[in-house]
Image: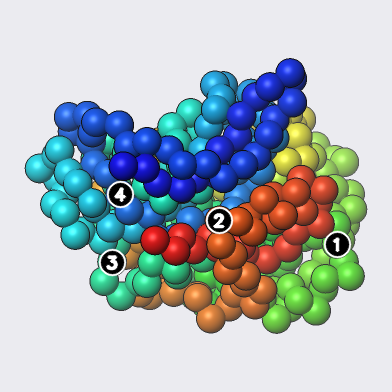
Amino acid sequence: MSYRALVISEANNMFIKEIKQIEFQELKPDCVRIKVLYSSLNYKDALSSSGNKGVTRSYPHVPGIDAAGIIEESHSNLFKKGDEVIVTGYDLGMDTDGGFGEFIDIPANWVVKKPSSLSFKNAMLYGTAGFTAALSVKRMVDHGIKPEDGKILVTGATGGVGSIAMSILSHLGYHVVAVTGKTHLKEQLLLNGASEVIDRSDLTQLGTKMLAKPVWAAAIDTVGGEYLSSAVKSTAYNGCVTCCGNVASPDFELNVYPFILRGVTLYGIDSVQCTMPLRTKIWDLLSDGWSIVESFKTIQTVSLSEIETQIDLMLKGKHSGRTILEHHH
């Protein structure tokens, strides 16, 4: 018995992508086998597909850090055959074969029961990006920041996490200021929930002093680097900043003044090892009160044979919107 998957192989220092048949292995104790119906394309998948050893150490490998599907076989008392589930984070698609295969064998404690009001496809519209965005917003809400407290800054607003965070915040009634280097996409950002759009240079100019004028009640940073330090320096008294990405840089320069003079809190957001009770809560929110499925404007659904083209576009920086992989079993 075998199933189809996009397999990345290493040969002569080259990485080759091809669709192959993979033989089923015996399912280990405390693990489940999931028939994957949908996955989604993330930047981490593109890196894994091009041989980035920071993401995936050993090849051959099947990428796909997100998966939604049905339990096919269970060696765990947590799930039974037929359960509808979602998997994001942990080691899926990193060094464990992921959602770009028709089946995945994984530890049962990585798996979340899919809320009944959320379709498999919509779960993957959110995927890790939506999950991370919702984690960031929840951290800000739990800090006590309310819509009437003032403007919320979102960096990397055209990216996966930034755009979804912006839509959720707008849906919850917050005034969102979107930061982007792609100012030609201003109209799209305004349609997606931004109340204002600023160029990233406008933000970094705020970060040149030790402490900037307080402008934001809170900030959701998805890019790191100088944008994160500028956001912290310009956040108002008792405000908070969440940090979940490093595409600008993993390093940032900062002093203690925003923390000791303004009581600003910096929260790290981790979607990979996040605890199961919080995971379940986030998916419940996304399926109900925080549902923003209608705000996804550019969605394309592709088959396994078409995903390679999308990966190549993403690696060239020419990919936009959400790409969903649908497995045709």
Sequence-first tag of 1 and 2: 1
Q: Is residue 193 above or below residue 89?
A: below
The residue indicated by pointer 1 is: 182
Provide residue 220's location: percent of width, then percent of height: 61, 54
The colour mode here is rainbow
Tag nearer the camera, 3 or 4: 4
Q: CA distance from mark 3 to mark 1?
A: 35 Å
- Does dot 2 land on a helix, a strand or a loop? helix
Q: Is residue 29 above or below residue 188?
A: above
Q: Is residue 275 visible?
A: no
The residue indicated by pointer 3 is: 115
Query: In this orientation, which residue lies closer to the viewer: 185 or 266?
Result: 185
Picture residue at 37% right of the left edge, 42% below the top: 2
Q: CA distance from mark 4 to mark 1?
A: 39 Å
Q: Residue furthest top?
A: 12
In the rendered structure, find residue 34 and report the number of the disc placed on it.
4
